[in-house]
Image (cartoon, coloured by chain):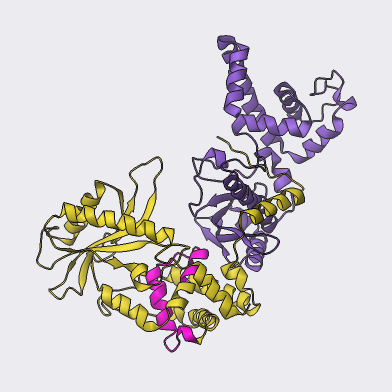
Chain colours: A yellow, B purple
């Protein structure tokens, strides 16, 4: 199997299409969330839209969340006078049905059952439109220097889709996820686009991925990223910290050696999954070949 | 006391090199004077098909390599319950009974041996557990003190916990007590009975670990004794049987 074919298969396995159980479950829960918010805020016009990787087409099965907006109109204080109040009121609205875990700008939804907490992989992002155009939005920031951030969903989506690097972004996201690299996905997306300015997926996934790694090693120390929604206003240096840069660079150096040796399957895994019979056979083989029995214990 | 990797930097270099050479998706880091290995572990069949992939965190203990590394599954693929051999308190995996370390992480073994052995086998056990609807055909010791008794019974080839207790009492001696009665209950002296088995285990199991087991077993037997006095032997034995399934 050629590398391009292998990487396409890797991404196919990572694709969550509309018929997949994961997406069906997400959409069903999302509808419940929308109903809950609309009931709570009754006649208040709120903009509830898909956002994040689902909207941008960069979602991967390895790690996925469904982001949804809950934006109030400019000049409308029904959701709260300040962004912090909006954040808190949306949190309260969701708390009737969910255990709500507040993040920097989003509200993570989990089941109420503390014994068996289920994470629904849904983040609700409260905010308020900056003006009547309903493009730019201010969202609350619970952490960081500024308590609000200007963002624009459409600009973000256009930035990603316009890059023609969606598959490369998904591949880099998968690589980040498999290595548990502590870097925001949003930053990884911007970094891929910035570092591969003159490249598109059509150059070949292996070429794009290797170029990305090479560029990381050469340029990461001096790179400054801009948020397409607010290029001069949002400072991303705190998110692309020196620690994140060092982690990316060191990992890139290591992986380039694997690529040089054509060890792609070590980086992204096998593309064929064993069925139950094959799993049973493998377990029997392990049982017979192990000189020491597989004998887990528990302190209790 | 200095952390192990400052005492022996070569050992850390060796660990890092081994991990980097063998695993493209596992990475070593040091945080707050603790060495971690994090990333994804792929489990493959001999035919090269994927059996499973697991996000893991391996914590290298302070007294490495005397103590074995500690494993956590960080991808939330399993409920971290005792039946799956996870410690509910800290979500660590119970790869093997502590006194059996000599079998699973013998002296001289590397971090790669540990990943390819006990860690991969632990995940195979989890796959088997799911395939069999919540019961692994690969075995596994009972939890807690029951598992301790089970391990030593199998190891010593005895059938009762009293023999295990006698073994652990003898084991606690600083020397090999050749002239004492054998733990097996035969009435013969140790030197004429299970001396070879005793010597072999004496060389393999650290005295402090066996001492811990002795204390645990002594507490357990005392508790059982008082329960038997209160409720009767049959009732207590029946309850124990039920707990052990």
The one of A35 and A88 positioned closer to us in this rendering:
A35
Residue B45 percent coordinates (x, y): 67, 59
Name the residue at 62% across, 39% down: A297
Number of numbered discs visible in the structure rendering: 0
The one of B101 and A127 positioned closer to us in this rendering:
A127
Name the residue at 18% across, 56% down: A38
Task: Tell me, yes or no, if residue B63 can be seen here.
Answer: no
Residue B25 within the segment the image draws in magenta: no
Asked if residue A261 is positioned above or below residue A291 in the image, the reply reads below
Quarter containing the N terminus of chain A: bottom right
Residue A62 percent coordinates (x, y): 48, 63
Question: Is residue A101 shown left or right of residue A2?
Answer: left
Name the residue at 35% across, 62% down: A66
Asked if residue A193 is positioned above or below residue A250 in the image, the reply reads below
Main secondary structure of the magenta stretch:
helix
Task: Tell me, yes or no, if residue B126 can be seen here.
Answer: yes
Residue B43 percent coordinates (x, y): 62, 58
The one of A220 and A110 positioned closer to us in this rendering:
A110
The image quarter containing residue A199 is: bottom left
Which segment is the magenta one?
Answer: A173-202
Name the residue at 51% across, 74% down: A249
Residue A46 percent coordinates (x, y): 17, 63
Quarter containing the C terminus of chain A: top right
Question: Is residue A229 shown left or right of residue A19?
Answer: left
Question: Is residue A66 shown left or right of residue A289?
Answer: left
Asked if residue B97 is positioned above or below residue A207 in the image, the reply reads above
Question: Is residue A49 shown left or right of residue B221?
Answer: left
């Amino acid at each position: 199997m050629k590398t391009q074919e292998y990487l396409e298969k890797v991404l196919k396995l990572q694709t969550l299409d509309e018929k997949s159980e994961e997406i069906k479950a997400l959409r069903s829960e999302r509808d419940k969330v929308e109903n809950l918010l609309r009931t709570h805020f009754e006649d208040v016009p709120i903009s509830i839209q898909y956002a994040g990787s689902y909207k941008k087409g960069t979602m991967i099965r390895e790690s996925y969340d469904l982001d949804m907006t809950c934006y109030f109109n400019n000049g409308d204080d029904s959701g709260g006078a300040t962004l912090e109040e909006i954040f808190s009121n949306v949190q309260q609205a969701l708390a009737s049905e969910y255990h709500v875990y507040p993040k920097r700008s989003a509200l993570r939804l989990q089941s109420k059952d503390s014994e068996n907490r289920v994470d629904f992989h849904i983040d609700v992002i409260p905010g308020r439109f900056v003006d009547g155009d309903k493009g730019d939005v201010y969202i609350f920031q619970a952490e960081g220097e500024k308590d609000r951030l200007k963002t624009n969903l459409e600009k973000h989506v256009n930035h990603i889709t316009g890059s023609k690097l969606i598959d490369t972004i998904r591949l880099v996201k998968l690589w980040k996820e498999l290595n548990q690299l502590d870097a925001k996905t949003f930053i990884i997306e911007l970094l891929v686009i910035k570092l591969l300015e003159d490249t598109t997926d059509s150059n070949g996934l292996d070429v794009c991925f290797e170029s990305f790694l090479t560029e990381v090693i050469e340029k990461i120390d001096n790179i400054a990223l801009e948020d397409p929604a607010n290029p001069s206003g949002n400072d991303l240096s705190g998110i692309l910290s020196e620690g994140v840069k060092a982690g990316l660079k060191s990992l890139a150096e290591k992986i380039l050696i694997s690529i040089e040796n054509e060890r792609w399957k070590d980086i992204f895994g096998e593309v064929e999954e064993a069925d139950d019979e094959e799993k049973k056979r493998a377990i029997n083989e392990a049982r017979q070949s192990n000189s020491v029995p597989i004998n887990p214990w528990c302190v209790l | 006391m200095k952390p192990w990797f400052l005492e022996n930097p070569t050992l850390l270099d060796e660990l890092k090199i081994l991990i980097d050479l063998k695993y493209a998706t596992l990475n070593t880091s040091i945080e707050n004077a603790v060495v971690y290995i994090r990333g994804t572990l792929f489990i493959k069949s001999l035919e090269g098909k994927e059996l499973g992939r697991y996000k893991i965190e391996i914590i290298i203990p302070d007294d490495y390599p005397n103590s074995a590394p500690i494993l956590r599954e960080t991808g939330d693929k399993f409920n971290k319950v005792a039946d799956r051999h996870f410690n509910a308190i800290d979500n660590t995996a119970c790869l093997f009974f502590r006194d059996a370390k000599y079998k699973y992480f013998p002296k001289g073994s590397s971090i790669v041996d540990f990943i390819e052995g006990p860690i991969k086998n632990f995940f195979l056990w989890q796959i088997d557990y799911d395939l069999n609807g919540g019961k692994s055909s690969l075995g596994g010791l009972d939890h807690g003190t029951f598992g301790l008794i089970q391990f030593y019974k199998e190891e010593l080839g005895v059938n009762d916990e009293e023999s295990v207790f006698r073994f652990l009492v003898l084991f606690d001696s600083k020397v090999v007590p050749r002239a004492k009665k054998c733990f097996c209950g035969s009435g013969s002296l140790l030197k004429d009975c299970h001396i070879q088995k005793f010597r072999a285990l004496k060389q393999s199991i650290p005295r402090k670990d066996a001492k811990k087991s002795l204390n645990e077993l002594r507490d357990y037997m005392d508790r059982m004794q008082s329960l038997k006095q209160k409720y009767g032997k049959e009732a207590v034995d029946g309850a124990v049987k039920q707990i052990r399934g």
